[in-house]
Amino acid sequence: MIDKVLQYVKEYQMIEEEDCIVAGVSGGADSVCLLLMLLEINKTLPIEINVVHINHRIRPDAANDAAYVRELCEKYKLSFTLVEENVAALARKRRISTEEAGRQVRYAAFERVLGTRKGKIAVAHNKNDSCETFLFHLFRGTSIRGLAGIPPVRGQIIRPLLCLSRQEIELFLQERSVPYCIDSTNLEDTYSRNVIRHHILDTAVREISPAAVAHISSASARVREAYELVSDMTAQGIQTCVSEKQGVFSIDKEKFLRLHKTVQGYVVMEVLAQAGGSRKDLEAVHVTQVQRLFGSQCGRSLCLPHGLRARRDYTGISVYSSIYKEGTAHGQEAALPEYAVSKDERRRLEAGEALTFLLGNGQKLQAKLIFLENNGMDFKNIPENKYTKWIDYDKIRNSIVIRTRRPGDYLTVNVMNQKKTLKAYLIDRKIPQSERERLFLVADAAHVVWLIGERLSSYYKVSEHTKRILCLEQV
């Protein structure tokens, strides 16, 4: 059995020479077996073994387990770290299950001990654990990702015993007369996984097939291989149909619908996870809701976990946080900056001084005046750059304001100075609703002088009659 584990470790390249291995050892059969296997590996591959034991303070006899693990470390001259944490209290404080709190405490401790050293974190999950995870996810509802079981390697975490069943582990220790601790909480049906272990998986082994664990484990491994393929296809799909700008993720409808139906769901889930910063609380129902949004009319939206909002726009769907990065108060979007050019600033501008305004998207708007001594200017050289505009300064009737849009805003769209509402213009340009609220403009009261990065109102264009030019440039 030692050779079986050594081959498994080699197959998945779990351990390298001179690695620091932080091993979580509870004192139970699995973790004691893990420690013995690491000692076997150390005979042929030089590694540093550091043992970490967590006392969750749930059982009165937990101190006995810590004492046993300490004795093992003294016997084999290994580094031993004891971490004690009131997991039940932590679970109440964080409003999570005691299982999840215990997991968080364990892995935080393992990472602290490993620190920045080159190495891995070894945990003692076995083949039965992976089967229980498979069934747990199957019963609760999951995608193929959840049916992939427990991976042998995930980042720095390695699981050398995933090739062994619980029965093999206990037999290994029995043959060598190696004692181990029994966690009484593992015998209770308080946790869902214990119910699966005692009443479902054991029954399957006794009543259906003695090889049930091996068969489920094999099926889970095949699902994991399929999931790896789907993951690659998902990454390609995201590259094809998803773009991101300033925290807004846009899914192109035409390109999205060309993807395989299965991949579509995974693309949506990945977009939601990236936009929200976590997969927690994201479920298949949310993916389905977003997919249905493709068939809705423009402007329809839905609220999702993590403060996310998905909105149907002209080209597809935009996913973004309903809380802007600039900050919020009680969940409301923070106001973007607004600047009204003061009389003093106008005097400075007219005296030849350049002014700079900071926009909320990290960009700057620079303003300066160009004075024309005569009308001999060649107006064919007027900049047509998207982010640089020349404006007839003397046509501005009110104070210049740099802001986002308001109801009633309008532009002039031709030489006849016919008006068009800004809302209608944005609709015609098919600019997504999620982007409209963050567009900056230069306004003369309700008259939009320049929608920055977009259109200049016809009324303010320079002509042969222009005396002073206001040069605006976004940098």
Image (cartoon, rainbow, N blue to C red):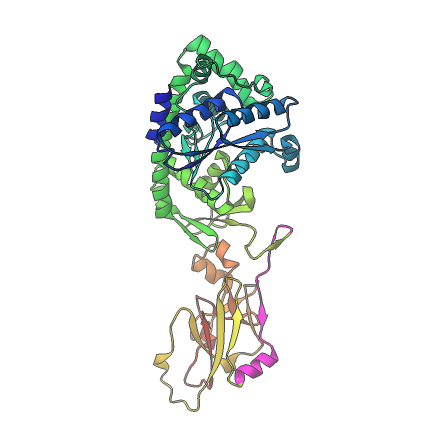
Which region is colored magenta?
Answer: 330-350
**Quadrant the C terminus occupies:** bottom left
57 left or right of 462 in image:
right
Residue sitting at x 42%, y 69%: 387
Locate residue 115, reporting x and y percent: 49, 42
Residue 161 in sight here = no
Work out which residue is located at the far top of the displayed protein and give it.
Answer: 207
| Along the line of sight, the residue nearer the viewer: 38 or 43 | 43
Q: Is 120 inside the magenta-drawn segment?
A: no
Residue sitting at x 48%, y 61%: 424
Locate residue 204, reporting x and y percent: 45, 13
Q: Is 349 inside the magenta-drawn segment?
A: yes
Q: Is residue 242 above or below residue 168?
A: below
Q: Is residue 42 above or below residue 397?
A: above
Locate residue 400, reporting x and y percent: 55, 75
| Along the line of sight, the residue nearer the viewer: 265 or 450 | 265
Q: Is residue 389 above or below residue 61?
A: below
336 left or right of 23 in image:
right
Task: Please tell me how many numbered marks the rendered image carries.
Answer: 0
| Along the line of sight, the residue nearer the viewer: 464 or 89 | 89
**Quadrant the N terminus occupies:** top left
Q: Is residue 344 above or below residue 376?
A: above
Work out which residue is located at the far bottom of the displayed protein and give it.
Answer: 374
Residue 75 in sight here = yes
Locate residue 122, reporting x and y percent: 45, 31
Res 209 quadrant in image: top left
